[in-house]
Amino acid sequence: QVLLQGSGPGLVKPSQTLSLTCTVSDNSILSGDYYWHWIRQSAGKGLEWIGRISLSGNTKYNASLQSRATISLDWIKNQDHISLRLTSVTATDTATYYCAREAYYGGGLDPWGQGSLVTVSS
Amino acid sequence: QSALTQVASVSGSPGQSITISCIGTSSDVGRYNSVSWYQHHPGKAPKVLIHDVTKRPSDISDRFSGSKSGNTASLTISGLQAEDEADYYCGSSTDSNTWVFGGGTKVTVL
């Protein structure tokens, strides 16, 4: 069973850049059969889709975050990662951030990572 | 892209059936058979219950079922159990090749 693991700083100062990475326990990134998504949830609110990337590097973003969000595939420490960068953060970006996988052939977003809580505060 | 519309809360007694609706538009729910449903217990990762409108992963109980009519998708939970108390979200791909979620429905087992 594939596992997704998100990681990154739990605290980011206002106006700075939030950076998170998601590792995948198998080689499914390189298979090219999946989209890789980032989703977030602020306290007391619902799920908000941030964006997604394919192996080819094709990206799509939530229009409300497009100017600040960048999703990329990176090779770090001999492993592929799905990275999220969100610039010029404010307190409203405080949320739990999830990565998730979506197969091209369907199946919904499955699985999801366990979530990374990021707090924006000075 | 506006969020899909879900009722904020639904409750039921153990053993009962409940249905959660997810209202979209002809640009998302109505256009694609990619609607999926997620169960989210606080502090845990969301879990897919239904994908592609009606399909259920092999590890998901058959008490969960999905359907769609026009721009509205629905999730039915039969034989409600205490462990079903959670937040439920629908999601759909869109004609902009993006993804959109519903606002979420809190299910309470009385």
Image: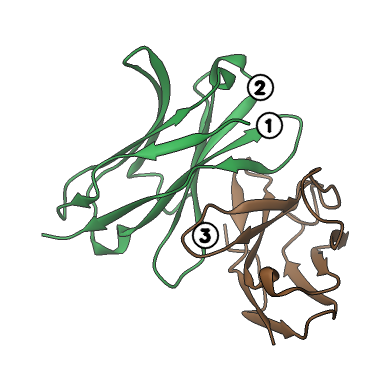
Give the percent coordinates (x, y) of residue A107: 74, 39
Which residue type does callout 1 highlight?
Ala
The one nearer the camera, A93 or B12, is B12
The answer to whether residue B85 is above or below residue A56 is below
Residue lying at the far left in this picture: please name it. Answer: A122
Residue to which mark 3 is pinned: A47
**Residue under the point 73% across and 68% down:** B23
Q: Chain of mark 1?
A: A
Name the spot of residue B18 as percent of width and height, x first.
Answer: 81, 77
Q: Disc 2: which chain?
A: A
The CA span between labels 2 and 1 is 6 Å
Colour displayed for chain B in the image of the structure:
brown
Q: Colour of chain A?
A: green
State the mark number for residue A89: none
**Residue A103: numbered disc:** 1
Q: Quadrant of the N terminus of chain A?
A: top right
- Looking at the image, which is closer to me, A83 or B39? B39
Toward the viewer: A50 or A95?
A95
Name the residue: 36% across, 12% down: A78
Where residue A11 appears, as percent x and y from the top left, is 20, 52
Q: Is residue A29 left or right of residue A119?
A: right
Dot 2 and dot 1 residues touching (CB under 8 Å): yes
Respond whether the residues carrying marks 2 and 3 are from the same subunit: yes
Q: Earlier in the sequence, mark 1 or mark 3?
A: 3
Q: Chain of mark 3?
A: A
**Within-10-Å neighbours for mark 1: few <14, some 14–19, many 20+:** some
Q: Which mark is residue A33?
A: 2
Whether discs 1 and 3 lie on one chain: the answer is yes
